[in-house]
Amino acid sequence: MFTRSLVAALLIAAPAMAAESPHFGQPITDADIAAWAIDIAPDGRGLPAGRGTAVQGEAIYVEKCAVCHGFDGVGTPADALAGGQGTLGTAKAIKTVGSFWPYAPIIFDYTRRAMPLNNPQTLTNDEVYALTAYILKLNGLVGAKEVMNAKSLPRVKMPNRDGFTPIYPGNLK
């Protein structure tokens, strides 16, 4: 239990204690922020330059993704990336990139930001476009040689695109 005198003593001593602190860290710079400000909007705003096809992505997937997501994106030990279309309205919904995710650019965003799990943010933009194309191909949404880039990726119509309601101040009631 704090007494008034203890609180008063702490308030008086706080500036002196702060002056003696080790001052860990340093102010963050604009360059530091830019390295992490890599988000991609659902409509594709923020997608970087680069390109890739599913044919290119398959080799990258086998090398860097299959150990967690299984060959052909079927899962184990991590989540499945492919399949599940038509199951969301059932008691046994299977939520995959192809059945649940509403916008293709968020595949790029998540993959670039968080994968591979043991070494995130190490893939080049071309590798991420190729992996995204491969995941979309596994779900039957693009062809093997179809080029994914900042213009084509937002045009991919995901099966669950209309399954989400955007949250805008006007529809929060």
Image: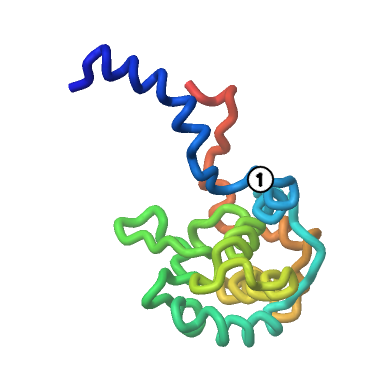
Q: In this view, does 40 lie to the left or right of 84?
A: right
What's the amino acid at mark 1?
A: Ile
Q: In this view, does 118 lie to the left or right of 30?
A: left
Question: x, y (%) of residue 152?
Answer: 77, 62
Q: Which of 92 and 97 is in front in this view?
A: 97
Q: In this figure, what is the number of numbered marks?
A: 1
Name which quarter of the figure residue 5 lies in: top left
Question: Badge 1 is on which residue?
Answer: 28
The residue shown at (59%, 72%) is: 135
Residue 125 drawn above or below residue 172: below
Question: x, y (%) of residue 18?
Answer: 49, 32
Q: Which of 61 and 156 is in front in this view?
A: 61
Q: Which of 57 and 114 is in front in this view?
A: 114
Work out whether residue 158 can be spotted. yes
Q: Residue furthest top?
A: 4
The residue shown at (50%, 70%) is: 117
Name which quarter of the figure residue 150 lies in: bottom right
Q: Nearer the viewer, residue 129 or 104?
A: 129
Tell me if mark 1 has few (under 14), some (14-19) or many (20+) residues whose alpha carbon lies within 10 angstroms of its own: few
Question: x, y (%) of residue 96?
Answer: 47, 64
The residue shown at (69%, 75%) is: 127
Residue 32 drawn above or below residue 21: below
